[in-house]
Amino acid sequence: MSSESSGRGRCALVARFPRLALVPRARLGLFPSPVDVCDLAGGSRLYLKRDDLNAAEFGGNKVRALEFLLGGVERGETVLTGGGYGSTHVLSTAAHAGRLGAETIAVRWAHEPNESAQQVATQATERCARVIESATVAGGLARLLLFRARLRFRGRSHYIPLGGRAPLGVLGHVGAALELAEQVEAGVLPAPACVVLPLGTGGTAAGLALGFAIAGFRTRVIAVRVVPRAAVGSWRVRWLAHRTHRLIERLAGERVTHRVPMNLEVRHDAYGGAYGRPLPEGESARRVILECSGVRLDSTYGAKAAAVALQLVADADSGPVLLWVTYSHGGHVQSIESGGESARNK
């Protein structure tokens, strides 16, 4: 497990708001996560924020939220959460709770299966102490099972909301934006005009948008929806950012003068008709990123966001574009040295 003394456990959020050091936080991540450069045909360039490398294993955007959501969890305790079949949140929660010596109980419901989801679901089953299965998709029965599980284990477990979608978890993603701002100030990369990421439960998008506003950046956060429209929308993301903004002010004991950001765009054109269903444009973008950088994206999240990012790069007026790589393929994913050159050397 990382430590502050290692130099790779520093939290940019705590550096900006020192009183947040009092908030219980599990040291799970390796920060800052690196920035790579993908040099594309024609001389254009796409920057990659490698959050798939932010933990020794099972990295990804969930690590940042879990640092706060698992703060205070002790050995021998139980964590309760839920998600769909192939949920990276369920897998990440089980893996990182296990690092703390806690066990995880998960309520899981059906999704259209694909190879990636099956791999994630298998690993999650292996790491959870118990999985309560629902044959239905997310909805009435699945949520009823989760509610009943919360009642059953109330007082004996720590509940982690679906996808980590809670202001406490969003703090980690605010810190991620502040971390990138520090990398910009250090000359690692130019200030991105656009940051593109997949949109699932919305916590990462809310935190990045709020964090860039706090940093004084005008960066546009483009969240590419990969879940049904009813599950998330721009108003949900903005409301979550607003609640997190209020939480920071309360915990930090100071007024955050920046308004809750409105520089957020939700893209609905890369969904593909079902969660986890590959999109042809996404698969093409996935191959482009692999060929130019060696970075392996998944079909459910990263590939669809990459398709939008490459569209923006092709637009000469978009300015610097950064793709936030949110998904780690199970274990620790090594950078392929023959691929993209690290932006730290630029």
Image (tube, grey):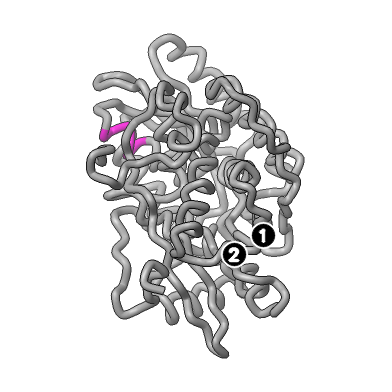
Q: Residue at x 44, y 42 (%)?
A: 12
Q: Residue at x 37, y 57 (%)?
A: 329
Could you classify mark 1 by the number of other residues whose Cα lies within 10 Å: few (under 14), some (14-19), or many (20 or more)? many
Residue 111 higher or lower than 40, as above or below: above
Image: magenta residue range: 94-99
Badge number at residue 304: 2
Query: Dot 1 lies on which element?
Result: loop
Q: Is residue 302 left or right of residue 312?
A: left
Check if residue 95 falls in the magenta segment.
yes
* Disc 1/disc 2 C-alpha distance (Å): 7 Å
Check if residue 345 falls in the magenta segment.
no
Q: Amino acid at mark 2?
A: Lys
Q: Residue at x 73, y 51 (%)?
A: 263
Q: Amino acid at mark 1?
A: Tyr
Q: Nearer the viewer, residue 333 or 283?
A: 333
Residue 292 placement (x, y as % from top left): 44, 80
Residue 183 placement (x, y as % from top left): 45, 57
Residue 94 placement (x, y as % from top left): 35, 36
Residue at far bottom of view: 42
Quadrant (top left, top right, bottom left, bottom right) of the C terminus: bottom left
Q: Nearer the viewer, residue 192 or 327?
A: 192
| Residue 213 visible in the current orientation | yes
